[in-house]
Image (cartoon, rainbow, N blue to C red):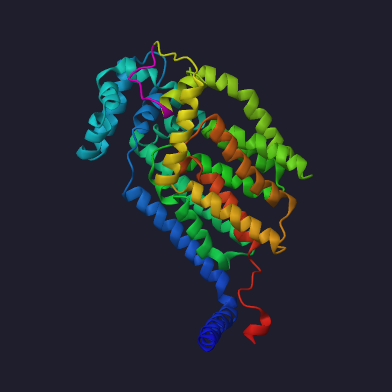
Amino acid sequence: MVGAGRIVEDITVRLLATAEWLTRRAGAFSAPLGLAIMLAFTATVAVVAWVFPVHNWDMLAYLAAAHEAPGVSVEALHAHAYDTVRQNVPAGDFLVLTQDRDYRIAQQADPAAFHSMLGFYRVKVLYVEATRWLSGLVDPYTALRLLAVVPAFAIGIAMTLWLARERALHLAPLALALAMAAQFGEVARQTTPDALSAMFLIGGMLAFLARREALTAGLLLLAFLARPDHLAYLGVLMVVALFARSFSWGVTAAFLAGLIAYGPMTMGADHPGWWVHYWFTNVEYVPTLVGFDPEFSIAVYLDAQVRVLVRSLVEQSWLAVLIVGGFAWWQMALRGIAFSRRQTAVLATTMLAIGAKTVVFPLYDTRFHFAYLVVFGLVLIGALRDLRFVPAAIAR
């Protein structure tokens, strides 16, 4: 048994040494190869997202919100949204969007009920206004598609630039695995603000690490305007960076600007409020928000928390990415792999912000956490750039 164990050990060492030797010989080509891999993957995701989109019900609400104007009736908004989708999506998809459940049947049948939902969507000001502006250049359906595919391509480029800055392009396969685990392809195919907001947040965090404060402030503020729930991440990042003794006026400016704008944005959008939104998202899709004002219940709140956790564990991948990433961070720290203060701030912020957001408003779908997971993973991957898989003594 001892002899067999030694044989297995010898074979393993020789295989690792061979891999190390090949890696060294291919070293001159590893960065260009990594660049080619990242660009090919980015192009693939963008093409697939354009050819095979996912038709989310939310696109109906965003089309209506972007079409709002003085003098446009509720009935006209309803007709515009449903006619646009009917003319552009396959008949089977349209049937699912309109007849799949009681809520969707009610929204198609009742323009007033449909209009009562728009407060959830108007609050994504940048996405709605970008859709409105693009709809003047192309048809509204194409505008929504462009606001997913173009940002998705930009996200791939931002990830590539991140690896290049960290001199980690040879680790492109790890970045691909991260993107796939974080459901990059699904985010790119959705007609929702997720890709647009992720583009700005990932770009803003790259600027944060590079200490480009003005660019950090601008990009992170745009991320907030596309998805106001990013405000929690910005607030946590501001505090963590301060405790890490790496104060960022760019992050602080973006957070304060978002905090000041949050009230007017939600009131201007006629957002129904936190508890109504919490109930609607996690408890019941009520057919209309007119007169809907449920009393706060700690039992309902906790029940929703449990159900979201279970769905995240069973159906989604964001918790897995976070657990594996957290374990990797711990092991890297034990082995003396160094992180800068700002990199440490990003890692800690991701953990704390996702936890805080879940307590306030739990969301089980991975796409809501996509940008945070990508930033978290890229910081870890960048720190591995000089990792040697085989000790020098063994490789010789």
Foreground residue among 5 and 226: 5
Q: Position of residue 55 (x, y in %)?
A: 32, 39
Q: Is residue 264 left or right of residue 192?
A: right
Q: Is residue 112 above or below residue 180?
A: above
Q: Which percent across, then down, holds residue 291? A: 40, 10
Q: Is residue 288 above or below residue 7?
A: above
| 306 lies left or right of 49 | right
Residue at point 52%, 33% (across, down)? 227
- Looking at the image, residue 83 sits to the left or right of residue 21; the answer is left
Q: Is residue 169 magenta?
A: no
Does residue 393 appear in this view?
yes
- In the rendered image, the residue lying farthest to the front is 1
Classify 131 as above or below 291: below
Give the total number of marks visible in the rendering: 0
- Rendering coords of residue 368 (x, y %): 48, 40
* Residue 207 rendering spot, x and y as whole percentages: 66, 48
In the rendered image, the quadrant that contains the C terminus is bottom right
Residue 250 falls in which quadrant of the image?
Answer: top right
Q: Main secondary structure of the magenta part?
A: loop
> What residue lies at 50% left-to-right and 54% top-to-bottom?
156
- Looking at the rendering, the stretch of residues picked out in magenta corresponds to 282-290
Residue 365 visible in the snapshot: no
Q: Residue at 45% across / 42% down in the picture? A: 312
